Image (spheres, rainbow, N blue to C red):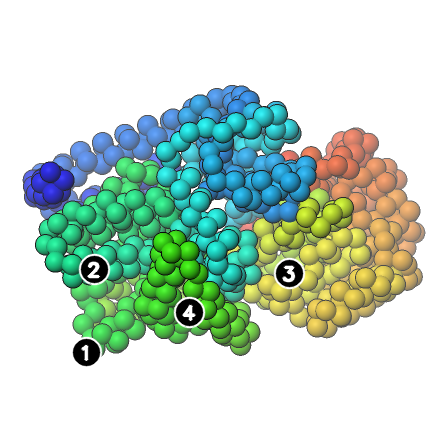
Amino acid sequence: MFQDLVRSLSINLRRVLQWIDIPTIAISYSCVLVYFTVFRFSWILVIFLGLSLLSFIYQNGIWRTFKLCLILFVFSSICLGIRYQEEKAFATDHSVSKMIPLLDTIQVDGDQVRFRAKHSGRLYQVFYRLPTKEMQTYFQTIATPIELEISATIEKAGSKRNFNGFNYRQYLKTQNIYRIITIDKITAITKINSWDIRYLRRKLILFCEKQFPHPLSSYMTGLLFGQFGQSFDEMETIYTSLGIMHFFTLSGMQVSFLYNSLRHILLRCGLQRHIVTVLLIPIILIYGALAGGAISVVRASIQKGLSACGITSLNNFSVTLLLLFIWQPKFLLTTGGALSTFFVFVVSIVGYKIKQETKIKNKVMMTILLSTASLPLLMHAFYSFQPVALLLTLPLSFLFASLMLPCLSISFFVSISTGISLNQLNICFIWLETAIQSIEKLTPRPMVIGKPSTAMLIIMFITIGVLIDRWSNQKIRFALMMGFIGMCLLTKYPIKETITVVDIGQGDSIFLQDRFNQHTILIDTGGKIEFMKEKKWQKGTKKHNAESNLIPYLKSIGVGKIDTLVVTHTDADHIGDLLTVLANIPVQKIVVSQGSLTNKKFVAVLKQTKTTIQVAEVGQQFPIFDSYLEILYPKLPGDGKNNDSLVLYGVFYQTKFLFTGDLESEGEATLLNSYPLLSVDVLKAGHHGSKTSSAKTFIKTIKPKIALISCGLNNRYRHPNQETLDTFQSNQIAVYRTDRQGAIKFQKNGKSWHIKTVK
């Protein structure tokens, strides 16, 4: 019966495609443009969609265009309906007293646990601080369905706070999550019955973690079930640096391996081909669920199912794309979904164009084209490109697909069926990680290119499309490649000068970027004050603010190196992330005050940097823009604390800027004694707007027009102080605050500065 159903679906699908009489790739391409126009509106997309339809009319006539427009009308109506429901769900008030955790999403990190949970058909992201070690163990090992009764705080997730920054709220929306819950107290835990396959997945993951040693267990849970765990974090960073993390998250190679292996076994057992096909389709769909429903796995499962029904090549890709829209409408709004889909598209569309003498040459050429074609998306998502990935992709794809996956699968099935663990395999994965770590140490840093604008991204894709289509024409190929390189250079070297107060939470970090990256200056790196955990079990993975805000922002604007890093003073919220920044972006020299060298901990940190250290002197100048940034203070060595902050001054394109670190009123008075005629247009207010800084006398003397305050949202110090805000208001000073407006950018337009904020 199921066999007849598969045949019927296959025949009917072919009939529908024949009746439509429009290439499926044209339908998919047009739907993608409509999709992004609805969910990520841009006039550039609207114009491009219009031009594409005009081109389609010219090539295919009015009747086919009418049918295409009818399809797009239906599709856009569905997308608009989804968008409406999303906005409605986001605006609706939520109240939760009970929830059912999705156990396969549980992540325990010290005394913090996070997971997703359901309540009344809605999905939530949940956070909870564990009160005891026993509760930590409970969440680490639980595998049976439960319901929690809770008292909790419900709020909207934070939105983007930096230019080109990660938008957590937008990401959660793509997962159909519209609120986050912070549990104050769990009042009751009740076991429930459920047939959700997620619980089986959780049990299998826990089985692997218990049965196998590290790192074998990490690769087994990651490659077979789509969950690597925290023990894999260090290696994930290394794989990402080498540009090969997509083996684990985007390729969907697990599905191909499972399908091909089972097909071979069943055929060898004497089963007929059509029976094997009927058996394999539900198996790979079930496996897709066991692998966590990751887009790459689901996409590969659908493609294999369609191939089994006789739908191949571009038709296979196009129908898969449309089915994915039905299954998870927002999948293309995620980085993983977009990259996974695009990789397959490139393979589908260029495969028939590559006809080399041998399979190895074929694969080498495919690797080069795939890496080149995906570069715009990689730039848009990660801002960088690792050329070494071109050399590593082919051997590692063979290693993982032909050796590692079979070994992991055999080991898993032997262990779960007999209880015997083939732990001897662990040494192979230890050798693998040692080799990868050695390669990473010898490999240069990834090339930081930056994030292309929407217009640039579209032009890049058009260029690559024409390049693939005209690959055999050497002159056109060379011209297009030069054009593509030119667009990368324009992204890497911006033509406008900027000064940005980066939103790094409670702290300071200001970046000055000259046109074409001729000169770059970073004032402080930000950081957070660490509060020691009382017990060992409470300590989790140490996370640095710079990894999620400052470093991504710098890379997104093409910054691959920093000329000068100025450390105003030694407070953790100004230099706590110094080593993290240096580990990701090279710095030519670090400028510190004489007084800061009295801090032994800070001196120890400086020794770890292995970077040129320069002791600041009053009058010292750093070239930037049309002038220079000059040190005004302190004249005498201090203690490296607030009133010993380096004060920097610059007149850039007729606008006077003053950056005061955490300088307090005492230091401000000393500064005025040295520079009684000091006048300022833009003041970076001292000490995050605290009442100990920005004294009335100081403000009245320097007469700033604009005050910039860098402070964290809802910070415990209640910065900025109302007294300071009143001082600014009484002097008619415009105030910009990172806690309310996100990052603040001064961008030169013509002969003046234009102010932009994220919010």
Position of residue 347 relative to residue 66, above or below, is: below
Which of pointers 1 and 3 indicates the residue nearer the eye?
A: 1
Which of pointers 1 and 2 indicates the residue nearer the eye?
A: 2
In the foreground, 756 or 641: 641
In the rendered image, which residue does mark 1 sit on? 357
Q: Position of residue 523 (x, y in %)?
A: 71, 57
Q: Secondary structure at mark 4?
A: helix
Of callouts 1 and 2, the N-terminal one: 2
Residue type at mark 1 is Glu
In the rendered image, which residue does mark 4 sit on? 389
Image quadrant where residue 397 sits: bottom left
Image quadrant where residue 325 sits: top left
Residue type at mark 2 is Ile
> In which quadrant will I find the C terminus?
top right
Whole-angstrom CA distance, mark 1 to mark 2, is 31 Å
Whole-angstrom CA distance, mark 4 to mark 2, is 34 Å
Q: Residues within 10 Å of mark 4 (few under 14, many from 20)?
A: many
Of callouts 1 and 4, the N-terminal one: 1
Of callouts 2 and 3, the N-terminal one: 2
In the rendered image, which residue does mark 3 sit on? 581
Residue type at mark 3 is Val
Whole-angstrom CA distance, mark 3 to mark 4, is 23 Å
Position of residue 376 relative to residue 135, above or below, is: below
Image quadrant where residue 488 sits: bottom left
Q: Position of residue 242 (x, y in %)?
A: 47, 67
Q: Secondary structure at mark 3?
A: helix
Whole-angstrom CA distance, mark 1 to mark 3, is 47 Å
Q: Position of residue 602 (x, y in %)?
A: 80, 62
